[in-house]
Image (spheres, rainbow, N blue to C red):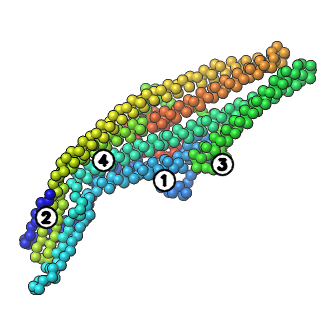
Amino acid sequence: MSIASSILGRRVPVRWAVLAVPLIVGGCMMHPEGTAGQRDELNAVGKAYAQPVEKREIPEVPVPATWQDVLRRACLTNGELEAAYHEWHAANERIDVVSYWPNSNLNLGFSYMFSPGNIKAWDRTTVTAQPDPSASLKLPQQARQGGQVALDAAREAGEKFRATKFRIQRQVLGSYLDLALMEEDIRIGQENCELLRRVLDNARSRVQGGAPQQDLIKAQVQLHLAENMLQSQQTQTASMRAMLNGMMARPADAALVLPGHLPDGRTISVDDDKLIAAGVEKNPELGGLAQQVAGRKDAVELAKMQFLPSINPTAGFTGSLSQSLGSMVMLPTTIPMINAQIRESKAMLEASAAMLRQTRSERAASFVATLYALRNAERQEAFYSQTILPAARNLLTASRQDYVSGRVGLVELIDAQRTLLDVRRTAAQFHIEREKRLTDLEELAGVDVETLATQATTQPTTAVPVGPRSDQATK
């Protein structure tokens, strides 16, 4: 339904009619509050992707490579993480698309009247200007509300980027820690083989002195089994190294040398209560769902604004004979459709709120369960390292002395040695288990453990720098 009004036949200055043209052409952005801050976060992350990947300065992996070196390169070269950034970037650009006003192109009309009368060419010319009649002109508040919905979607995309970053971080660190544990097993296996060779030499000497050959055969069997296990571990290490190289966009057979010891345990600088609070509040999945809820709330308000009329102004003049100003008002008559859209938006809002509530409960439980597992691994590592390991070393020392003096046989000596190696492996496994559970907590919390002390009381941010823990990498 349209209502047109015009002013015809009056001496209105031409500039009045022409005034509508720059107002429509100029336009403006009806940005909602918070748009600038969202773009600052995006731009901070985007510095890493300013150049195409083939032109970027990708850091080389040093020798030896720490977990910081591996993680920084992996994040700078990971295509999935970069794709998440570009999706976030696209969502930010969507704000300009929907919040620009006026939202219609300018329709310019020109006509010339042919008449036998003695009329000047200027007075035969009619010029009109109006928004594109095929697209209803939104009201400014509708454009601003649409921008708010787009801003919520951009923030949700930012949370998805953050979730992707910490998921990739967990995968890379998990692979690095597995490789470090395997190399520790190899070092333990090499020590075992060296010890078994000395036991074998001692058994040969004793056989030459008239002792039975059973000890010699047992020592040979144990050495062969240990060497076979060592070769299998070395093969697995090559495979694990190739996978880790792939995560860093390096050739599978590229040299990758880790330090000759397990990585040091990372420090958690806050207590468990603050850790749990930060983990639940800053979880990127929860943050994304919260932004989704906010976006659907704003979408409900945007749907209600469809009840507002649309006004399309027009301006025109015919030479110096007439000038006109008018407007076309589009009244909403599709009331049932608008109501259905409002109900649809409310239903989607309720669905998002329910999912947020359920996910919050699940993530809180997951965080607490992971924290329990981490603390148990810490306890087990301390128990084996401080209590069981010294006792196992004393047992091996005593068994060696008793074997040399003939008070115990080779079986007892090998058992003592195997006990020590098992204790060392178990302590190393609990150490790596603790570090892996720590990466799980970081993924759930959406923050790096090194920054928890300063971020525990601040709001979560989506501007996660690419190359996690870059502030810690040089320490």
Q: Please identify the residue farthest to the left as the structure is shown.
A: 10
Real-space Cα distance between discs 2 and 1?
Answer: 50 Å
The amino acid type found where label 3 is placed reads Ala
Q: Earlier in the sequence, mark 2 or mark 1?
A: 1
Which residue is found at the position 23% from the left and 51% from the top?
A: 142
Q: Position of residue 233 (x, y in %)?
A: 69, 35
Residue located at (54% from left, 39% from top): 171
From the viewer's perspective, is residue 451 above or below residue 216?
below
- The three-letter code of the residue at mark 1 reads Tyr
In the picture of the structure, the residue carrying the numbered disc 3 is 254
Position of the N terminus, as image quadrant, is bottom left
Mark in front: 1 vs 3: 3
Q: Are marks 2 and 3 in contact (CB under 8 Å)?
A: no
Q: Quadrant of residue 137?
A: bottom left
Q: Position of residue 31 (x, y in %)?
A: 29, 52
Q: Nearer the viewer, residue 431 or 336?
A: 336
The residue labelled by disc 4 is 149
Q: Is residue 54 above or below residue 242?
A: below
Real-space Cα separation, disc 3 to disc 4, in angstroms: 47 Å
Q: Earlier in the sequence, mark 2 or mark 3?
A: 3
What residue sits right under mark 2 in the picture?
Answer: 326
- Residue drawn at x 63%, y 22% is 384
Residue 475 in view, yes or no: no
- Name the amino acid, label 4: Val
**Circles 4 and 1: CB distance less than 8 Å?**
no
> What separation in Å lies between label 2 and label 3 (alpha carbons)?
73 Å
- Is residue 345 rendered to the left or right of residue 244? left
